[in-house]
Image (cartoon, grey):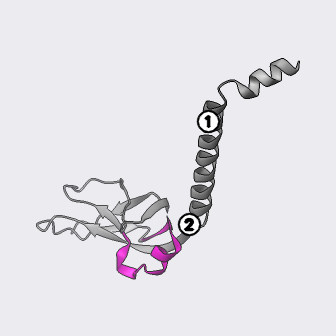
Amino acid sequence: MIAVLRYLFVEDFWLKLFSLALAVLIWVTVTFVSQRDAGIEERLVSRKLPVTILSAAEDVHNFRVSPSEVLVTLQGRPRVLQNLQTNDVRAIVDLTGAGAARDLRKRVEVSLPSGLSRVRVTPEEVQVVFPPDR
């Protein structure tokens, strides 16, 4: 029994010691990085935004959308969210090339500054309301 234990610890001692030191170094590095990243928390913020309609310049229709506002939930670091200005986030519906189709629903796109990500838009689509024909 003692011969087996002696063989386990003494045989290739320097290689085993080097492997142990390398394992400890990797463990310390991973622990340090994970603790540092844990301090960078991300928060969620919800904002009610008016929907901006994007259409071609030659398009003279008076489009409207229903609902005219959407609730946008954003995620980001606290410092980025604190520096967020009112004009930095926009809810846009692109109506370029939209004819006079009835019952048109369009997806709301959100324009964000870097460092933020969109979590949710409620509702995701809006109903396009065309002006009555004269």
* Percent x, y of residue 34: 60, 56
Give the quarter of the figure containing the C terminus: bottom left
Residue type beneath disc 1: Ser
Give the quarter of the figure containing the N terminus: top right
Placement of 78 over or under 31, stated as above or below: below
Q: Which mark is residue 43?
A: none
Stretch in magenta: 69-90
Q: Nearer the viewer, residue 91 or 133?
A: 91
Placement of 33 over or under 74, stated as above or below: above
Residue at the far right: name it.
1
* Whether residue 21 can be seen here: yes
Q: Secondary structure at mark 2?
A: loop
Identified at 27% across, 53% down, the residue is: 101
Q: Earlier in the sequence, mark 1 or mark 2?
A: 1
Which residue is disc 1 drawn over?
A: 19
Occupied quadrant, residue 64:
bottom left
Q: Nearer the viewer, residue 57 or 25?
A: 25
* Percent x, y of residue 76: 49, 67
Residue type beneath disc 2: Ile
Occupied quadrant, residue 83:
bottom left
Q: Secondary structure at mark 1?
A: helix
* Whether residue 74 can be seen here: no
Identified at 56% across, 66% down, the residue is: 40
